[in-house]
Image (spheres, rainbow, N blue to C red):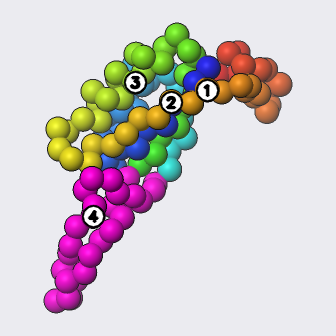
Amino acid sequence: MKLLTAIIKPFKLEEVRTALTDLGLEGMTVTEVKGYGRQKGHTEIYRGAEYAVSFLPKIKIEIVVPAQQVEKAIEVVQTAARTGQIGDGKIFVASIDRTVRVRTGETDETAL
């Protein structure tokens, strides 16, 4: 099992969720986060004063994926989240040693 963490633009969340659901992957954690990469923020004007916004709003999606579906899941997220502009996001993949469903005690693949 692998933990797929994707940082994407907020308006792409529904497209990514739908694409992952269509792939048969369900159950994800979504967190509103802020960050920056190559974008390095931007400037805004508020009440006549200009100020720098260093951290931009992003969405972090975390989903545990069976090892045999990781490459397809990455491809689906990448396709759904892409706008072609800087700041589209990143995908990270990490190994999961064990999963336990709290309610039933099921473990690993059956707990997904």
Of helix, strand and loop, which one carries label 1?
strand
For label 3, the residue is: 74
**In front of the other: 56 or 93:** 93
Q: Earlier in the sequence, mark 4 or mark 2?
A: 4
Of helix, strand and loop, which one carries label 4?
loop
For label 1, the residue is: 95
* Residue type beneath disc 3: Ile
For label 4, the residue is: 41
Quarter of the image containing the C terminus? Answer: top right
- In x, y percent, where is residue 40? 28, 61
Label 4 with label 2: CB-CB less than 8 Å: no
Residue in view at x 27 percent, y 53 percent: 38
Residue in view at x 27 percent, y 64 percent: 41
For label 2, the residue is: 93
* Residue type beneath disc 2: Val
- In x, y percent, where is residue 27? 56, 30
* Residue 23 visible to an observer of this rendering: no
Q: What is the magenta segment's predominant secondary structure?
A: strand
Mark 2 nearby-residue class (10 Å; few <14, some 14–19, many ≥20):
some
How far is disc 1 from disc 3 in space, using C-alphas?
14 Å
How far is disc 2 from disc 1 in space, using C-alphas?
7 Å
Q: How many marks?
A: 4
Label 2 with label 3: CB-CB less than 8 Å: yes
Instruction: Specify the quadrant of the image occupied by residue 14.
Output: top left
How far is disc 2 from disc 3 in space, using C-alphas?
9 Å
Quarter of the image containing the N terminus? Answer: top right
| 87 displayed left or right of 34 | left
- Residues drawn in magenta: 32-58
